[in-house]
Image (cartoon, helix red, strand yellow):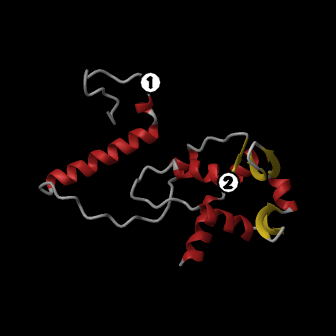
Amino acid sequence: MAQGINPLTNSSIENDSLLNDIRISRYLFYVNDILKQIISNGGIKPDKKKTVPFDLTNDELKKYEYTEELPLSKLVKKINDLKSNMDMKDLKLKDVGDWLIHIGVLQIVNINNHNYKRPTEVGKNMGISVRRIFNNYENYDLVLYDLSMQRYIIENFREMQKYIFEKNS
């Protein structure tokens, strides 16, 4: 299935099939590798591999798909979805937020005795905005990152990665 073949009919899976999603395909390859290891170990589960630090190749970074506006959590998820090595740790939302504070585009603001991340004037000029969301259950502020801010994060990925590595070392 990871190679786009239906195992029941031996025919190609349609292009719009969920199984052709790149993330599903990667997971299928990953499961296939684990099953091969179990078989080669005589049915014994292989030792858990030590996960490698988060890193993306330039080719993987080029695959990032920019969208109009999105919260940082979705931006980080999209970056994590670019990795092809399933043994790699995920990029953490907190680390990205800390880097954005470090470079001066976000700041911690205390509102009603709670700390929140909000854009600085520099951050606003670079494409970070705050939108008030009203729904049936609660009202809250959502910090959004536009195309130019997403592009800045991707273009400065190595700088961010270096900061995160040094901070966590």
Q: Choose between 133 and 37: the one closer to the eye.
A: 133
Q: Quadrant of the N terminus?
A: top left
Residue 48 lies in quadrant = bottom left
* Tag 2: amino acid: Leu
Residue 165 lies in quadrant = bottom right
Q: Secondary structure at mark 2?
A: helix
Residue found 38% across the figure and 45% down from its top: 27
Residue found 80% across the figure and 61% down from its top: 118
Q: Is residue 7 left or right of residue 64?
A: left
Residue annotated with mark 2: 72
Q: Earlier in the sequence, mark 1 or mark 2?
A: 1
Question: Residue 31, how many percent across, how many down?
Answer: 31, 47
Residue found 77% across the figure and 65% down from its top: 116
Q: Is residue 169 left or right of residue 163?
A: left
From this viewpoint, which residue is outermost toward the right?
121
Residue annotated with mark 1: 15
Q: Is residue 41 left or right of residue 98?
A: left
Mark 2: few, some, or many residues within 10 Å (few <14, many ≥20)? some
Question: Residue 168, how many percent across, how many down?
Answer: 55, 75
Mark toward the viewer: 1 or 2: 2
Q: CA distance from mark 1 to mark 2?
A: 30 Å
* Tag 1: amino acid: Asn
Q: Secondary structure at mark 1?
A: loop
Work out whether 42 lies above or below 24.
below
Residue found 31% across the figure and 27% down from its top: 5
From this viewpoint, which residue is outermost toward the left?
42
Q: Choose between 45 and 114: the one closer to the eye.
A: 114
Mark 1: few, some, or many residues within 10 Å (few <14, many ≥20)? few
Question: Residue 10, how many percent across, how many down?
Answer: 25, 23
- Residue 135 disc label: none
Residue 13 lies in quadrant = top left
